Amino acid sequence: MPRVICAGHLNWDVTLRVDALPSPDGEVTVDSRRRGGGGSAANVANGLSDLDVDAFLLGSVGEDEHGYVARDELAENGVDVSNVVVTGELETTTKYIVVEPSGEVMVLGCPGANEAFAATDLSDSELAAADHLHLTSQEPETARRLAERARELDVPVSFDPGRRIDDRGYGPALTTVDYLFLNDREAALALDAFDLAEQTLVLKHGPEGAEIRRGDERTAHPGYPIDAVDTTGAGDAFAAGFIAALADGGSDQRALAVGNACGALASKVPGARTALTWEEIRAFIGE
């Protein structure tokens, strides 16, 4: 069983579904509210565990009920949370996710404990035993150091910096990793600011599918048409599927097909996570 370490945010998510976003000084009714663990690194680790990957999470939570529940949810699904840092100085980070009828989301974040971990909280032996390291949004210096250590140990690294790529100083980490996951907005910012000639770019085009750029080589997959219910966590599900397919020895084309299928399946249900199975994925992509 391949072993993948996911490093980054573990949050408590409160998802609010509304008919429309309110205008300034306006008010709308919340149609439904859903609470549970979230955070990009945690979501990817959860998806990888669903797909028969030995998933290990490096992250941090507060010493509070939300932190314990978020860790327990992951552990019950088979994710190794032994290296999740618990701090009594900060509360578990809460994200308020507002979902409109189209499935698009907006996020309101409360600062908390999700960046209280450090690169040194992962030992060299644990990192060396991994087949892959996946980084998500986190403190830039932590991301840089983890990527450098993985490269020294010949462990492949992927990085999905997320929506705050333009204000977090991720440059040194972006140019150190092997695979870089970016949506269209993030790609426009990163390609304009950094020399990414050495990185394999995995570009997510939403309903238009995804592509891999490796130098002048291009591999594309058109994706799968669906009626989106909630796109929260769709990018994380894509990453889980993509990494799981690669770890299984799949080609670039298969990794894109599986990643797109996982992203589509996640978009069809409310919340940041959905249970993924190889049986469902194979049926979805017609295998």
Image: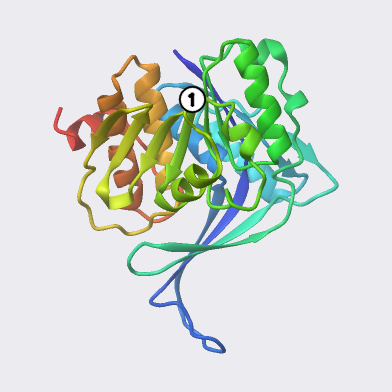
Q: Is 77 above or below relative to 245?
A: below
When asked about the image quadrant of residue 278, the answer is top left
Horizontal placement of 138 versus 268: left or right?
Answer: right
213 in relation to 131, above or below:
below
Identify which residue is drawn at 38% across, 76% down. Answer: 19
Q: Is residue 166 left or right of residue 67?
A: left
Crowding at dot 1, Cα within 10 Å, few <14 / some 14-19 / many 20+, comes out as few
Residue placed farthest to the bottom in the image? 25
Q: Secondary structure at mark 1?
A: loop
Residue 268 at x, y percent in the picture? 30, 52
Q: How many marks?
A: 1
The amino acid on which the numbered mark 1 sits, given as a three-letter code, is Glu
Location of residue 137 with respect to 229 vertically, above or below:
above
Quarter containing the N terminus: top left
Residue pointed to by mark 1: 198
* Residue 11, percent from left and from top: 62, 48
* Residue 83 in sight from this viewpoint: no
Tell which of 74 and 227 is nearer to you: 227
Residue 178, image x and y in percent? 50, 24
The C terminus is located in which quarter?
Answer: top left
Identify the residue shown where x is 48% and y is 25%: 198
Foreground pick, 194 / 98:
194
x 22%, y 53%: residue:
226
Residue drawn 35% across and 31% down?
213
Q: From where the camera sits, is residue 143 visible?
A: yes
